[in-house]
Each structure stands twice: as structure tokens, then as C-alpha cells.
Image (cartoon, helix red, strand yellow):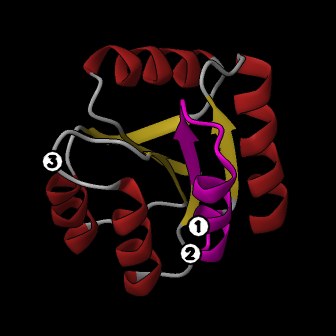
Amino acid sequence: MKIGILDDSYILRTALKNTLSSGGWDVVFDAGASVDLFKFLEKDKLDVLLLDVFFPDENGLDTLSKIKTLDKKINVIVITGMNQRAITQEAQRLGADDILYKPFSTKELFAALEKIKAKLF
């Protein structure tokens, strides 16, 4: 399963990559801005994207909408520090496959990925 990470925090991206890699998951993409994601998707595919909601210059929910318009097969796990009903509802409406609230555990992350893996394979 090809996994991507889109989060403006380099520290969080690195921690997620290391955690996922040590757990046997295949991280093929990570970036801090959606422009890099869409460039990547022009030439390659993802099975799962871990997507932050809040960026300094863009909105992760807008990115989610564009991703689902571009390729409905990409599973998106929204990651956010804001456990607000409006964000959760909008993410679900836009097609998020799961939502993880920061700080989340490795167990929660792996469980979300296993749920998607079971759906795909």
C-alpha cells in the first residue's frame, strides 16, 4: 500500500515516516504543501494520504475536495489537532475515510491503515 503524508510540520512528517517505516508501511511521498502533492499525483499514485487540515497558506479540507475530484480511489485519513464537530462533519462530507485527532497513538494510526488495507485487498 503506497502511503503519502501532507503536513506543513516537517517534524511531524519525519516522525510519521519513521513510525510507518518501522511498522512495515511503504511511505512513497511526503510534503508540506498541496502543490507538491498534485505534482506527484500527475506521475504516480497513492493508496492512502495522511492529510493535515490546517496549513499556513491553504486549507486541508479544500485539498481533500480536490483529491477526491481528481481520484476517488485515494483513501484519505485526515489528521488534525482540532476536534471540532464542524471539521469532522465537513471532512466526512468531502469523502475522508477516517479522522485522527492529534496527538494520536501509533496503535490508532496503524488501526486506521489496517482498516483501509482490509477494504483495498
Give the magenta part as a residue range: 77-96
Question: Does residue 19 lie above or below 36 as drawn?
Answer: above
Tell me if label 1 and label 2 are in contact, CB under 8 Å.
Answer: yes
Q: Which amino acid, by three-letter code, is at mark 1? A: Glu
In the image, residue 69 lies at what x, y percent? 41, 86
| Secondary structure category for the residue under label 2 | loop
In the rendered structure, the answer to whether residue 114 lies left or right of residue 104 reads right
Q: Which amino acid, by three-letter code, is at mark 2? A: Leu
Residue 88, picture quadrant: bottom right
User: Which numbered disc flags the more N-terminal residue, 1 or 3?
Assistant: 3
In the image, residue 114 lies at what x, y percent? 80, 44
Question: Does residue 47 lie above or below 42 as drawn?
Answer: above
Question: What's the mark number on residue 90?
Answer: 1
Q: Which residue is mark 2?
A: 94
Is 91 colored magenta in this rendering?
yes
Question: What's the mark number on residue 57?
Answer: 3
In the rendered structure, the answer to whether residue 35 lies left or right of residue 17 reads left
Q: Is residue 73 in view? A: yes
Tell me if label 2 and label 3 are in contact, CB under 8 Å.
Answer: no
Residue at 79% x, 21% y is 107
Residue 86, picture quadrant: bottom right
